[in-house]
Amino acid sequence: MDIRMNIMLSVAEVTEETQEQARRIVCAGLEERFGELDPSYNKDLDDIVSWYAGQGHLFLTGTLEGQMVCTGALIREGRDVGRIARMSVWKPYRRRGIARCMLQELERRARHMGYAKLVLETTASWLDAIQFYKANGFVEVQRDEEEVHLEKVLSHRAR
């Protein structure tokens, strides 16, 4: 819940029943940014439940008033490092604090899973995404023409 925006986002792990709607939300965001999509770049979206749960990762969905409005994933990168991925908010629900709620839940679960650090990458031209992550405590650690890499230390155990 984001008290500042008075949002009651219900967050749950993706299921067989919800994975198609989750895929649509992620793909809509990618199509908005890139135009058309090449399905070969998004194999994890073919069967979200199997790909994420089957490998010890986590894929979450966020629901507001019964409508799925966002997604977010946490991928194991190492013993104590997790990667934030598949953050997407359905366009009509943006700028309401929903992404922040999802990110906070991913961070909470990452701490519970023993992660000491979170990493992520985003496209260098997505200035709003970069600004969002920096506003939420992520620090830029690398940049090239195409991507920006950010990280956030959750505890002093991070390497």
Image (cartoon, rainbow, N blue to C red):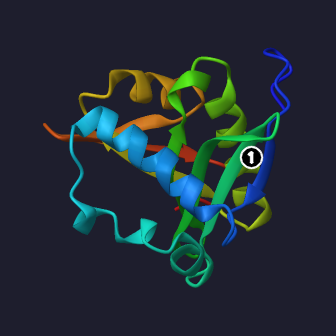
Name the one closer to the observer, 54 or 21: 21
- Residue labelled with disc 1: 105
Name the one closer to the observer, 8 or 131: 8
x 41%, y 21%: residue? 128
Looking at the image, is 40 positioned above or below residue 25? below
Q: Residue most toward the left? A: 145
Provide residue 63's location: percent of width, then percent of height.
75, 42
- Residue 60's image quarter? bottom right
- Residue 8's image quarter? top right
Looking at the image, is 25 positioned above or below residue 125? below
Does any portion of residue 124 appear in the rendered image? Answer: yes
Considering the numbered disc 1 on the image, is that residue within a helix, a strand or a loop?
Answer: helix
x 72%, y 34%: residue? 101
Provide residue 10's location: percent of width, then percent of height.
82, 43
Left or right? Give the position of 107 relative to 143: right
Crowd rating for badge 1 (residues with CA inside 10 Å; few <14, some 14–19, many 20+): some
x 58%, y 76%: residue? 79
Tag count: 1
| Amino acid under disc 1 | Glu
Does any portion of residue 155 appear in the rendered image? Answer: no
Provide residue 81's location: percent of width, then percent of height.
55, 64
